[in-house]
Amino acid sequence: MRRMPKSCSDRLDLSDVDAVGLIQTNVVNVLYLGDIAQKAAPVYPVELNGSCPQHIVALALLGESAAVETAMKAVAEKA
């Protein structure tokens, strides 16, 4: 299992995180959807990588409940 490097976790303030939105997608859409989500609401987009042979990745949106909900709606409208 891969973990977030300490240098990245030090920059991420998890005190404001009380919700997580997950979106299963492909590698190219992680960047596109993460951009849409971050422009729609103050969320932290994080790419989640698995070890499955299909190369499926997920995008996690971390933030306050209302912000994550707003970002997920924005992504659903654009996707």
Image (spheres, rainbow, N blue to C red):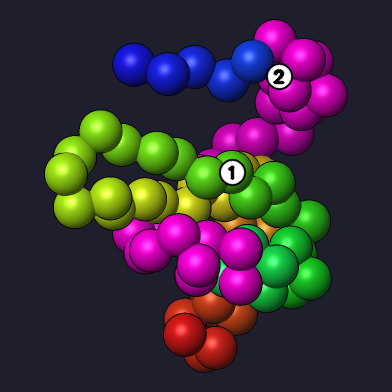
Instruction: Name the residue that disc number 1 marks.
Output: 46
Q: Please tell me whether residue 12 belongs to the stretch shown in magenta.
A: yes
The residue shown at (40%, 39%) is 49
> How far apart are the alpha carbons under marks 2 and 1?
11 Å
- Where is residue 33 drawn, in percent x and y? 57, 70
Q: Nearer the viewer, residue 72 or 10?
A: 10
The residue shown at (52%, 61%) is 30
Element on which disc 2 rests: helix
Q: Residue type at mark 2: give it.
A: Ser
Instruction: Name the residue that disc number 2 marks.
Output: 9
Q: Nearer the viewer, residue 38 or 16?
A: 38
Q: Nearer the viewer, residue 62 or 53?
A: 53
Residue 33 appears in view: yes
Crowdedness near tag 2: few (<14), some (14–19) or many (≥20) residues, C-alpha within 10 Å: few
- Where is residue 27 drawn, in percent x and y? 45, 60
Q: Where on the picture, by quarter, is residue 37?
A: bottom right
Q: Please tell me whether residue 70 belongs to the stretch shown in magenta.
A: no
Q: Residue type at mark 1: give it.
A: Val
List the single residue furthest toward the left. 53
Element on which disc 1 rests: strand
Bounds of the magenta segment: 6-32
Going by the image, does 77 lie left or right of 39? left
